Image (cartoon, rainbow, N blue to C red):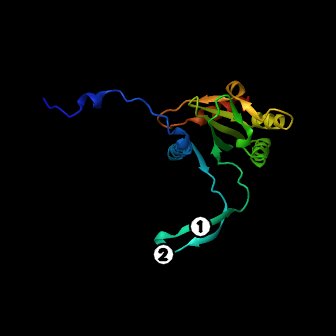
């Protein structure tokens, strides 16, 4: 018989640690998108942010550092691509708020972009990570637009209850880690009925 050091610890069931998941939210989405692409499920990518580099500290090629840069134009949304013959466009957001998603977390031009894409048949939404609840929801852009318009006259956020009612809870899995396209497929099927 072989005795391994700390053998009891090696077989003890490890508890999932989600403490850094907010910082890793984008990474989890990117991993899921990589899974979708490598398994020929969909092609969805993070959009690059258009910046204008103004000043570079260039001591040598290997150590070049951007010291000053500006956004060329306001970015639209984080991700876009194609799934099941449909254009997909979405923004990923994280909130520390327990009772609502502050609409200050999304810009007017992003809401307008989602609305325009949806009007042309695209499947558009927000992925919202509530850190305090450790939950991720997919909220279709039609609700984002509705609540954004409401904010001009009153409430400046979407309540957690409203997101639970109109959104879709996405559970974390193994492959892919965040199977949001399962929900998108439901939206497409409903749209095609």
Question: Number of marks in the image?
Answer: 2
Dividing the picture into quarters, in which one does residue 148 lie?
A: top right
Near mark 1 (Cα within 10 A), the count class, few <14, some 14-19 or many ≥20, is few
Report the front residue among 127 and 86: 127
Upstream in sequence: badge 1 or badge 2: 2
Vertical placement of residue 125 versus 162, above or below:
below
The x, y position of residue 96, in whole percent, is 62, 36
Near mark 2 (Cα within 10 A), the count class, few <14, some 14-19 or many ≥20, is few
Label 1, on which residue? 67
Q: Residue at x 64, y 41 (%)?
A: 93
Residue lying furthest bottom: 59
Badge nearest the viewer, 1 or 2: 1
Q: Which mark is residue 60?
A: 2
Badge 2 marks a residue whose secondary structure is loop
The x, y position of residue 126, in whole percent, is 68, 39
Report the front residue among 101 and 109: 101
The x, y position of residue 151, in whole percent, is 81, 36
Quarter of the figure that contains the C terminus: top right
Dividing the picture into quarters, in which one does residue 3 lie?
A: top left
Q: Residue at x 76, y 47 (%)?
A: 113
In this rendering, position of residue 29 left or right of residue 106: left
Dividing the picture into quarters, in which one does residue 130 lie?
A: top right
The x, y position of residue 149, in whole percent, is 83, 37
Vertical placement of residue 95 versus 37, above or below:
above
Badge 1 marks a residue whose secondary structure is strand
Residue lying furthest right: 153
Q: Residue at x 75, y 44 (%)?
A: 114
């Amino acid at each position: 018989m072989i005795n391994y050091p700390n053998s009891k610890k090696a077989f003890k069931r490890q508890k999932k640690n989600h403490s850094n998941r907010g910082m890793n939210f984008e990474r989890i989405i990117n991993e899921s998108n990589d899974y979708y692409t490598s398994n020929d499920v969909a092609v969805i990518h993070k959009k690059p942010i258009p910046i204008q580099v103004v000043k570079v500290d260039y001591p040598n090629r290997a150590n070049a550092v951007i010291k000053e840069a500006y956004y060329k134009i306001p970015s639209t949304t984080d991700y876009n691509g194609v799934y099941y013959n449909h254009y997909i466009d979405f923004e990923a957001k994280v909130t520390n708020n327990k009772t609502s998603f502050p609409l200050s977390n999304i810009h007017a031009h992003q809401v307008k972009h989602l609305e325009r894409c949806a009007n042309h048949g695209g499947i558009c939404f927000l992925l919202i990570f509530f850190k305090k609840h450790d939950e991720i929801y997919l909220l279709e852009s039609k609700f984002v637009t509705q609540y954004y318009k409401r904010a001009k006259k009153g409430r400046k956020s979407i309540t957690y209850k409203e997101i639970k009612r109109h959104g879709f809870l996405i559970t974390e899995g193994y492959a892919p880690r965040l199977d949001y396209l399962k929900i998108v497929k439901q939206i497409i099927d409903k749209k095609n009925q």
